[in-house]
Image (tube, rainbow, N blue to C red):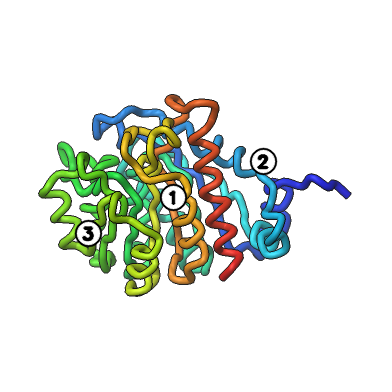
Amino acid sequence: MDNDLRVRDFIGRLPEADSKIHVIEFPSDHGVFTNRGRPGASKAPPLIRAALGNFTPHAVHYQKHTDTLERTTFAGTVPCENDVKKDQQRLGNEISKRLQTGILPIILGGGHETAFGHFLGYASSKKEVSIINIDAHADVRPLKDRMPHSGSPFRQAIEHSSGCCKGYHVFGLNPSAVSFQHFNFAKSAGSAILEGDLTPHLFRDHVEKLDGPIMVTMDMDVVNQAEAPGVSAPNASGISKELWLELAFEFGKCSKVASIDLCEVNPLFDRDNQTVKLAALTVWHFLLGFSQR
């Protein structure tokens, strides 16, 4: 028997009909380009998947972790054609199918336009949802020339005609990167917490008060750029990787969380795959947390 088994040796081991979690890739970053960011996030999903596969299961929580990994499937890639609106609808259709059958989707973006496609899965399923965003930016900008982009997903969700967004809660905002108007718009839709105020205790207390289901979106640019240099918008004053990974674990453990996406990893600006590996560790911690449910 191999004594050095990796995550890739467990994922997909059971028939897909027995899976509880689907990992879906969404290689879009045209929304980043529209938002005048630096493209490259479209290259991230397969690299994150490969890095995740190379990790080992948790040695202390081995049985629970591997049980979860065996019920996890790499479910393929949503085709993206640089038409953000159509690409988001395709993603929404894929998420809707999973939500209706009790599958928890993990979406590997892509730019943060991923989040609105993610939300459309709830809207298509007519499921009301609370949104939690871990992000340096509020991402509640208006459309640009009626085009959606990486800075607009949560305004789109809040204002969506379905009314499925029960509330928008953003944690980790960089006070030098969020305008007064955007901060207050986000706050009026739910809550807005600056990076310096974000603690595990505050976070847990806040999540306890939310009704489920919860849709989670984690933007890697909330992490300090010394620890996450390969992102679409580097952050000189972001949160620590330790707090970021703790949040990922808490999301996995929380039974209210029905889906999660991970966005804005940009391999073109990474250093020794540092950010890609941190992104993969994020998914690893989420799956470890899920195993504790």
Identify which residue is drawn at 13% across, 55% down: 184
- The amino acid sitting under disc 2 is Asn
Residue 30 seen in this snapshot: no
Q: Residues within 10 Å of mark 1 (few under 14, many from 20)?
A: many
Name the amino acid, label 3. Ile
Residue picked out by circle 3: 158
Q: Position of residue 87 (x, y in %)?
A: 37, 43
Q: Dot 2: what SS?
A: helix
User: What is the total number of numbered labels drawn onto the structure image?
Assistant: 3
Question: Which sits earlier in the primary sequence, circle 2 or circle 3?
Answer: 2
Residue lying at 26% horizontally and 56% vertically, measured from the top left? 193
Seen in the picture, residue 211 relative to 56 is either above or below; the reply is below
From the image, tell me which residue sits under label 1: 244
* Residue assigned mark 2: 54
Kindly state the secondary structure of the residue where label 3 is placed.
Answer: helix
Query: Dividing the picture into quarters, in which one does residue 258 lie?
Result: bottom left
Q: Quadrant of the C terminus?
A: bottom right
- Decide which of tag 3 and tag 1 comes sooner along the chain: 3
Pointer 3 with pointer 1, Cβ within 8 A: no
Q: Position of residue 213 (x, y in %)?
A: 39, 70
Which numbered disc flags the more N-terminal residue, 2 or 1?
2
Is 192 situated left or right of 95 in this image?
left
Which amino acid type is shown beneath numbered disc 1? Trp
